[in-house]
Image: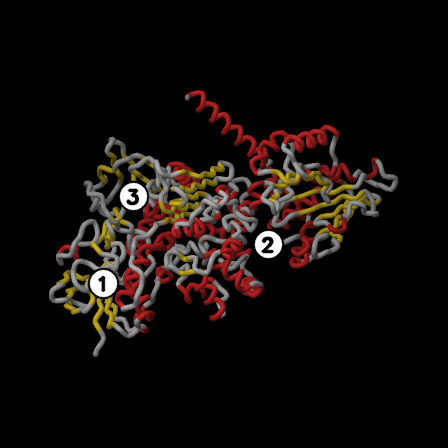
């Protein structure tokens, strides 16, 4: 008996994904023919914004190239639009590149997707008005960006914001017009929406909110957009991104049941025998889905049905969204607006730019919104989908502090290690942790790209790539690190080296962490706990006076400006310049320690006082009471300048080491560096301050100072090298400023000076700082960097004061 004939109308993501599943389950059951209206193989529509921005080539978003169809014995007709279906005769008629055709079928799958909705207003058919939906649409926008300056995007939803970001990257001025008062209102609550708008405005987007489009102005080409209130705005290009409508015309003309979409049951069957529908064109239990994860879930059920394999029916999907706009992390899953049956658990940290909300109904989580830090999205979606009972969980742990591995990564390795094998890592393609780990071991995979090819995990939206990278690391251990470092890239998320990233930022004028990853073509568009802090540092180093620090891309200690301890409490260390203090400072520290019930007070190796066991909620009020600068005991910055008592008190001292140490610490405090920096000043060659094993050691000698560089007293002990011998205190300041700035500009993120000076070479570094002109230039750039620093706890205290004043105003108004 010959193979059955299976026809698929639509060469998009949903339909072809179902065919992929089917070929695995029953590779020889069907003779498959696919009709695609577009002249391309199956491509990833989610990645169109990357093509628009010019960061990705068209060919790079192909999910399956032409060879895949041929290899799997699939007959593909591109540029061939099906014009009619005859369910009684079991035929479809098409026309296009292959000419008029009538093709018979035994089984038919309709996956015609959706059409972009064009607002039916005067002028909507003018040249210069584009609907954003296809590769061709992106090509038209890119061509327009070469000739014109200003674009107006109608629609403040996910698609519209991605289009706007792409056009900004192309150098256009962009205004986003939205009929509502908040962006992405179908996925975000008011708070997250306002945070999103503020963040995008910082990137250069402009917004015209609560504006109803009435008419597109222009005669031969669009020149502007007029609103219902009589106002208008100029435009050289108008992009319609106001939503999609299921493409049901074929089904309706064929007599199939159609409401909003093509009506299907739990097996994706339509009202006609042997005719199925999947994807955006289908309507299941009254819902037509427009996101990729539900479409793939439908495809998996349909494939089993066609293959004759037992499987569970499709019972609907819990939808979620991750926004991929440069510089912004946004996640929304399940129910996101409170009602009478839900309770909300919220964390809103204005200072760090982080907002998190979980909605609970009864004993189960039903939805979540995350802004600024989406590292918990996978864990929360697992709890939502599994309908886990949270009554035995500690409620405050539902929204955990991101872990110590870095901004955005949020302790990703620990999180994936704790996941069950059947936990879904790639929601778009339904790939579990167990499947990925098994493929890594059995196929010897060492890269995210290899996992994607073997399992399809991370193939669609790319949001799970950090999780896949973390699974590689936890599965392979040192082997993964070796594979990553072999390429000399800053991490496994990109093939670019530190030098290439820095050059790219400078050449393209990049200003945000996500923009760097977007424009420079990160393989893992979310980045990871290794590269995000690094990119954040490189941006601040290149543009110290204009760059706004991305707190979410910092390690948790640096975000909280306190060292997190293993029990979840924090360590607070005030600055004590040169290890010198006063009775009044000591008294203040003691009073604060008593007030906040600090369990342990310890003297540190850096000649400071450490308050251990501080609760998170006490951090800001404690610093308010202390009114002392942060000691940066947690940061990649100058930690301490250790000193001996020097010539003022010691009979062996030859110089004022305490005065020098205090001056150095006051000058370089808060300076961001690739890794932590420690200094010491000894008043004589007896070296009581241990200057020989510091990143920069200063030793007083008769008639001057010796400067020792690249020392380390940690795990890999290294004695510092003599960098220079200078005469005056001004020389000391100048040489150290030049040395540190050169380290800042050439060091790899996370690389201590003891490693850097070996890699770069002592003689080379010495030649740089001894060159008078270069030394002055480096000092000027150092001064620019220092001028932009501000004590983080003063910012936190001021933010808290503003919140308190606002609260009092609101309460008074009540």
Please give the name of the residue rendered at 13% of the width and 58% of the height, measured from the top-left corner: 254
Measure how far apart labels 2 and 1 are at the Cα level: 53 Å
- Sequence-earlier tag: 2 or 1: 1
Say above or below: 543 vs 528: above
Question: Decide: marks 3, 1 in contact (CB < 8 A)?
Answer: no
Secondary structure of the residue carrying tag 2 is loop
Disc marking residue 236 = 3
Please name the residue that numbered disc 2 is placed on: 748
State the residue lying farthest toward the front.
392
Please name the residue that numbered disc 1 is placed on: 109
Question: Decide: marks 3, 2 in contact (CB < 8 A)?
Answer: no
- Sequence-earlier tag: 3 or 1: 1
- Sequence-earlier tag: 3 or 2: 3
Residue depth check, mark 3 versus mark 1: number of the one nearer the observer:
1
Measure how far apart labels 3 and 1 are at the Cα level: 41 Å
Position in image of residue 191 (x %, y %) = 40, 36
Position in image of residue 407 (x %, y %) = 52, 48
Secondary structure of the residue carrying tag 3 is loop
Please give the name of the residue rendered at 11% of the width and 67% of the height, measured from the top-left corner: 89
Please give the name of the residue rendered at 30% of the width and 53% of the height, measured from the top-left corner: 316
State the residue lying farthest toward the right.
651
Name the quarter where the C terminus is drawn: top left
Measure how far apart labels 3 and 2 are at the Cα level: 44 Å
User: How crowded is the residue under tag 3: few (<14 C-alpha within 10 Å), some, or many (20+)?
Assistant: many
Q: Tell me if residue 247 can be seen.
A: yes
């Amino acid at each position: 008996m010959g193979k059955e004939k299976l026809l698929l109308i639509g060469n998009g993501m949903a339909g072809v994904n179902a065919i992929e599943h089917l070929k695995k389950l029953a590779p020889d059951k069907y003779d498959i023919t696919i009709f695609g209206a577009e002249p391309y193989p199956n491509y990833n529509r989610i990645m169109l914004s990357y093509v628009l921005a010019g960061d990705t080539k068209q060919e790079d978003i192909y999910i399956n190239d032409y060879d895949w169809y041929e290899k799997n014995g699939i007959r593909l007709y591109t540029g061939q639009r099906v014009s009619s279906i005859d369910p009684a005769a079991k035929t479809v008629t098409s026309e296009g590149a292959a000419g008029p055709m009538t093709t018979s079928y035994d089984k038919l799958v309709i996956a015609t997707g959706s059409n972009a909705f064009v607002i039916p207003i005067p002028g909507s058919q003018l040249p210069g008005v584009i609907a954003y939906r296809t590769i061709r649409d992106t090509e038209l926008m890119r061509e327009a960006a070469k000739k014109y300056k200003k674009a107006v995007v109608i629609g403040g939803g996910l698609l519209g914001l991605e289009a706007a970001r792409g056009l900004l990257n192309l150098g256009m001025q962009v205004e986003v017009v939205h009929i509502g008062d908040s962006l992405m209102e179908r996925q975000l609550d008011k708070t997250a929406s306002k945070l999103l708008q503020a963040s995008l405005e910082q990137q250069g987007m402009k917004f015209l909110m609560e504006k109803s489009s009435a008419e597109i102005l222009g005669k031969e080409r669009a020149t502007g957009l007029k609103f219902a209130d009589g106002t208008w705005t100029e435009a050289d290009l108008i992009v319609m991104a106001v939503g999609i409508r299921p493409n049901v015309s074929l089904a309706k003309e064929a007599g199939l049941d159609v409401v909003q979409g093509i009506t299907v049951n739990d097996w994706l069957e339509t009202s006609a025998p042997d005719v199925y529908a999947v994807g955006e064109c289908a309507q299941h239990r009254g819902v037509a889905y427009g996101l990729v994860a539900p479409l793939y879930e439908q495809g998996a059920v349909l494939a089993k049905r066609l293959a004759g394999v037992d499987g569970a029916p499709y019972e609907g999907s819990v939808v979620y969204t991750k926004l991929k706009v440069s510089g912004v992390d946004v996640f929304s899953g399940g129910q996101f607006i409170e009602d009478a049956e839900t309770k909300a658990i919220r964390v809103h940290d204005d200072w760090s730019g982080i907002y998190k909300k979980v909605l609970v109904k009864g004993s189960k989580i039903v939805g979540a919104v995350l802004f600024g830090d989406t590292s918990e999205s996978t864990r929360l979606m697992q709890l939502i989908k599994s309908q886990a009972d949270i009554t035995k969980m500690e409620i405050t742990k539902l929204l955990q502090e991101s872990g110590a591995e870095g901004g955005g990564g949020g302790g990703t390795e620990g999180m994936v290690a704790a996941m069950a094998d059947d936990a879904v890592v790639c929601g778009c393609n339904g790939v579990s942790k167990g499947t990925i780990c098994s493929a890594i071991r059995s196929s010897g995979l060492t890269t995210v790209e290899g996992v994607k090819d073997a399992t399809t995990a991370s193939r669609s939206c790319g949001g799970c790539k950090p999780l896949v990278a973390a699974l590689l690391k936890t599965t392979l251990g040192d082997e993964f690190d070796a594979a990553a470092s072999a390429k000399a890239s800053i991490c496994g998320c990109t093939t670019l080296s530190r030098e290439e990233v820095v050059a790219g930022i400078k050449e393209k004028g990049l200003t945000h962490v996500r923009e760097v990853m977007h424009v420079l073509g990160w393989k893992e568009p979310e980045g990871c706990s290794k590269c995000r802090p690094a990119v954040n540092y490189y941006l601040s180093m290149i543009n110290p006076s204009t760059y706004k620090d991305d707190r979410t891309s910092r390690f948790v200690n640096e975000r909280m400006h306190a060292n997190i301890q293993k029990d979840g409490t924090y360590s607070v260390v005030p600055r004590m310049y040169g290890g010198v203090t006063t009775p009044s400072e000591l008294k203040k520290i003691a009073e604060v320690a008593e007030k906040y019930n600090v369990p342990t007070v310890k003297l540190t190796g850096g000649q400071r006082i450490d308050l251990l066991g501080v609760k998170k909620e006490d951090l800001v009020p404690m610093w308010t009471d202390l009114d002392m600068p942060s000691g940066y005991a947690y940061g990649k910055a100058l930690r301490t300048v250790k000193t001996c008592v020097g010539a003022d008190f010691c009979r062996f001292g030859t110089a004022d080491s305490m005065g020098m140490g205090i001056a150095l610490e006051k000058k370089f405090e808060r300076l961001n560096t690739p890794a932590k920096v420690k200094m010491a000043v000894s008043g004589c060659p007896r070296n009581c301050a241990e200057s020989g094993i510091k990143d920069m050691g200063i030793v007083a000698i008769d008639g001057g100072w010796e400067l020792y560089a690249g020392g380390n007293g940690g795990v890999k002990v290294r004695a510092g090298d003599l960098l220079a011998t200078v005469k005056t205190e001004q020389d000391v300041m100048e040489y150290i400023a030049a040395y540190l700035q050169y380290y800042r500009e050439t060091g790899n993120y996370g690389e201590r000076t003891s490693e850097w000076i070996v890699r770069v070479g002592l003689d080379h570094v010495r030649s740089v700082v001894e060159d008078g002109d270069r030394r002055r230039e480096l000092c000027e750039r150092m001064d620019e960097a220092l001028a932009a620093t501000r004590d983080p706890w003063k910012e936190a205290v001021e933010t808290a004061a503003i919140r308190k004043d606002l609260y009092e105003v609101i309460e008074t108004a009540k």
